[in-house]
Amino acid sequence: MSFSNTLRRISCQGATSITTFADFLCSKIDPGLRLAIYDKTALVIAERMRSEIRDFNGSRANLEVCILKYLAQGENFEKFKLYIRSPADFLESYIQTHVKTYCLDENSRLVMFLNETLTQYYEKIQKAVFTSTTVVKDRRVSNKIISLWLDEFCRELGGVLRLPRSDLVGIEHLEITDIEFLNNAMTEALSPLRDRLKEEFARADLSSFEKQPHTILLEQFPGCKAQCPFCWAVCTNTVPNHDGDHQLVFHRPQFLGGYKWVYTDNLVIDICSSLVASDCYFIHPGYPRTLCKKYRDAGHPFSTWNILPDTSMQKYWKWFVCHFRAQLEEFYNGKFDGRGEIPASWHKITKQEALDELR
């Protein structure tokens, strides 16, 4: 074999080793890159919605007001029922619906966000390739140069995506000496990977995410989930598992918790905070007959609530009672009669007045 043919064979072997190295490394980058892009995009969606959508750019109390307005404007009794009975489930559903609308509209925001994140990660990987090449290209220990290159590459990507160095031991002993050629080969191998991901993202939907964007957004509105044992309103403390008593700014009519006046089918339209200032008694299944003002004596969960005397009721719930009277009587199997008769003044409250008071 001539000297020139020998050089050609060695050169081909070197090129094959580099191609093998680049293809194998990209196959290991692929799953971590895909996961990192979806995880990062989920965070981006939550951040954008927090800043761009009024419902989510304030406090949990502000979100609660937005939900009440949404319910009143829709006038859908089934949604009201879910909100009253399962407020945590309703909140999650409310956020999830908004995320779908925001991401899957005619502007295809989801595809745009995924591609933007892909570009950012692609540039970081290219930078890691260049940096690793720069660091090791002048090293004299040629038999360890690929191992050193991989050490540096994984170090550069350590905070970017998951790429365990232990997964790459199979290629660290390849005979590669042309580091500049390796740099170019990696750039060429990364391009098809990027193209495949772009094709995938063009068809992506929210089910593609391991951690859903709406779950991340929901976590940004933490709070206690305890419901008043009388009216079922949710404690307004923003700290889950907080110390001290549960409390509310505004209580609601007690029939929402299933209460009727004893020995009648009259629904209780009085609010908890007005009844604790009265001489009325309440009876709850499994609990003793107790004065409302001494509700704590009934034991848990009543003893965990601080209900301050207050006779004022929001116009919102007065409008709600009047507007959905028939549905409420059927659902709660009672009547707004007798001690539960609706005051004439409540019928004069318009939906707009109820909404205006929420601001």
Image: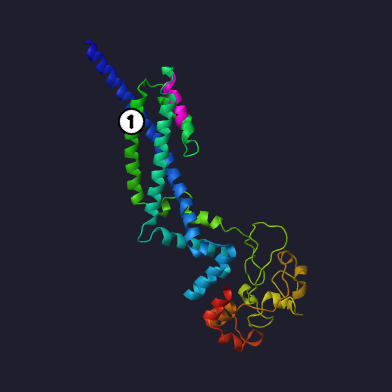
- From the viewer's perspective, is 352 left or right of 127? right
Q: Residues within 10 Å of mark 1 (few under 14, many from 20)?
A: some
Q: Is residue 90 left or right of residue 113?
A: right
Q: Amino acid at mark 1?
A: Asn
Work out whether 47 lies above or below 331: above
Q: Position of residue 85 (x, y in %)?
A: 57, 68
Residue 57 at what x, y percent from top left?
53, 61
Q: Is residue 86 visible to us here?
A: no
Q: Is residue 92 above or below residue 329?
A: above
Q: Which residues are magenta?
A: 144-153
Q: On screen, 41 above or below 294?
A: above
User: For the image shown, how many numbered marks are present on the structure?
Assistant: 1
The majority secondary structure of the magenta stretch comes to helix
Q: Nearer the viewer, residue 231 or 104?
A: 104
The spot of residue 95 in percent (x, y) is 49, 61
- Nearest to the observer: residue 202 or residue 48: 48
Give the x, y percent position of residue 259: 65, 76
Q: Quadrant of the C terminus?
A: bottom right
Check residue 356 for magenta coloring.
no
Residue at x 35%, y 27% (from the top left corner) = 182
Question: What coloring was used for the rendering?
Answer: rainbow
Taking the magenta stretch, the answer to whether it contains residue 149 is: yes
Say which quarter of the image contains residue 320. bottom right
Instruction: Residue under label 1, please give it.
Output: 184
Can residue 2 be seen? yes
Residue 185 placement: quadrant:
top left
Check disc 1 and report its element: helix, strand or loop: helix
**140 vs 17, nearest the viewer:** 140
Q: Classify 148 as above or below 349.
A: above
Q: Is residue 40 left or right of residue 88?
A: left
Quarter where residue 87 is shown: bottom right
In which quadrant of the rendered image does the N terminus lie? Answer: top left
